[in-house]
């Protein structure tokens, strides 16, 4: 048994998660355009999330390189989450990575260490990366929200709107070849939609010309291990998409 097989077995992905090789050779990338803004939830004052983002983006981040952007996040107090967290969690990995993984927000372990996806969910993500022959140091990992929400609740719409410009600037600087949105908050924020994970999975979406795959958050997979098989399908779609994009260049 090779290392990858052992990893898949540990993740309960083996033997049922055997990848069909024909999908590798003839992948078809059907890009799904972002959903209409009309689907977005309303926030205070009746603004859609898109309107709220435009008002709050400020346009001031567009000239920032990584060091300045990190400092900007470190000193940010744009929303109330900063008051309740230990430190901001910017992101980690290769700043020229082809692969970008985006989660929701820091939890207790991330708040303590300053690094996204550590603890149980982080170890599962590392194992998922190894299953597709990637190391954490080869990809970039970030969250939509940089400060831990109280009691690890889901972030509010206005908090997402306040923090999303930082992630957008990170993406502009990294220029990844593919984005994997892990969970509904990441998918909703990047695709500007309120659609369910179930309806977004299994298709190739697009974020400003970058293919985007929607999958489950590793923390959800820990609570619902039967969904790991679907998560593996999503990773296979991401790998096929990368290969299809490379062959079209
Ligand atoms: S969550 Fe984002 S917007 Fe809110 S204070 Fe932290 S860095 Fe700033």
Image: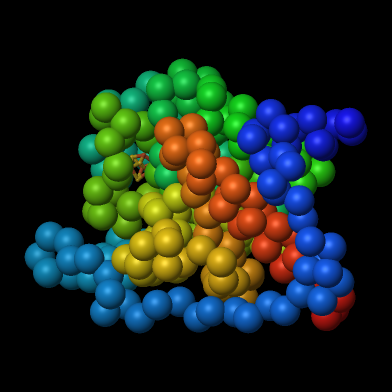
Which color mode does the image show?
Answer: rainbow
Q: Is 192 located above or below residue 238 in the figure?
A: below
Q: Residue at x 32, y 57 (%)?
A: 161
Q: Is 242 located above or below residue 131 in the figure?
A: below
Q: Looking at the image, which residue sits at the far left?
A: 45
Left or right: 191 with respect to 96? left
Q: Looking at the image, which residue sits at the far front?
A: 16
Residue 15 in sight here: yes
Q: If the picture is divided into quarters, which one holds ligand 1?
A: top left
Q: Residue at x 26, y 79 (%)?
A: 38
Q: Is 8 located above or below residue 38 in the figure?
A: above
Q: Residue at x 79, y 61 (%)?
A: 20
**Residue 241, located in which quarter of the rendered image?**
bottom right
Q: Position of residue 147 (x, y in %)?
A: 38, 35
Count of numbered circles on the image: 0
**Residue 11, located in which quarter of the rendered image?**
top right
Residue 60 in sight here: no
Quarter of the image containing the C terminus? bottom right
Q: Position of residue 190 (x, y in %)?
A: 46, 63
Q: Residue at x 70, y 48 (%)?
A: 17
Left or right: 193 with respect to 236? left
Left or right: 236 with respect to 231? right
Q: Position of residue 1 (x, y in %)?
A: 89, 31
Left or right: 242 with respect to 1? left
Of residue 121 and residue 136, the one placed in the foreground of this image is: 121
Of residue 38 and residue 114, the one placed in the foreground of this image is: 38
Of residue 151 and residue 120, the one placed in the foreground of this image is: 120
Q: Looking at the image, which residue sits at the far top?
A: 112
């Amino acid at each position: 048994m090779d290392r990858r097989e052992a990893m898949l077995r540990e993740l309960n992905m083996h033997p049922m998660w055997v990848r069909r090789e024909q999908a590798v050779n003839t992948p078809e990338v059907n890009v799904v355009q972002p959903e209409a803004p009309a689907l977005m939830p309303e926030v205070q004052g009746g603004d859609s999330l898109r309107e709220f983002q435009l008002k709050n983006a400020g346009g001031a981040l567009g000239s920032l390189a990584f060091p300045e952007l990190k400092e900007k996040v470190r000193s940010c107090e744009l929303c109330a989450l900063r008051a309740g967290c230990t430190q901001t969690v910017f992101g980690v990995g290769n700043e020229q990575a082809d692969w970008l993984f985006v989660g929701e927000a820091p939890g207790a372990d991330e708040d303590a260490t300053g690094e996204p996806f550590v603890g149980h969910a982080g170890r599962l993500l590392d194992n998922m990366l190894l299953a597709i022959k990637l190391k954490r140091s080869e990809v970039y990992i970030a969250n939509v929200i940089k400060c831990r929400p109280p009691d690890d609740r889901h972030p509010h719409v206005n908090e997402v709107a306040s923090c999303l410009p930082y992630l957008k600037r990170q993406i502009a600087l990294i220029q990844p070849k593919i984005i994997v949105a892990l969970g509904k908050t990441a998918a909703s924020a990047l695709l500007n939609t309120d659609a369910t994970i179930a309806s977004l999975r299994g298709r190739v979406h697009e974020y400003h010309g970058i293919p985007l795959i929607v999958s489950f958050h590793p923390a959800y997979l820990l609570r619902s291990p039967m969904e790991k098989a679907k998560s593996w399908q999503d990773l296979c779609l991401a790998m096929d998409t990368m290969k299809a994009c490379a062959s079209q260049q």
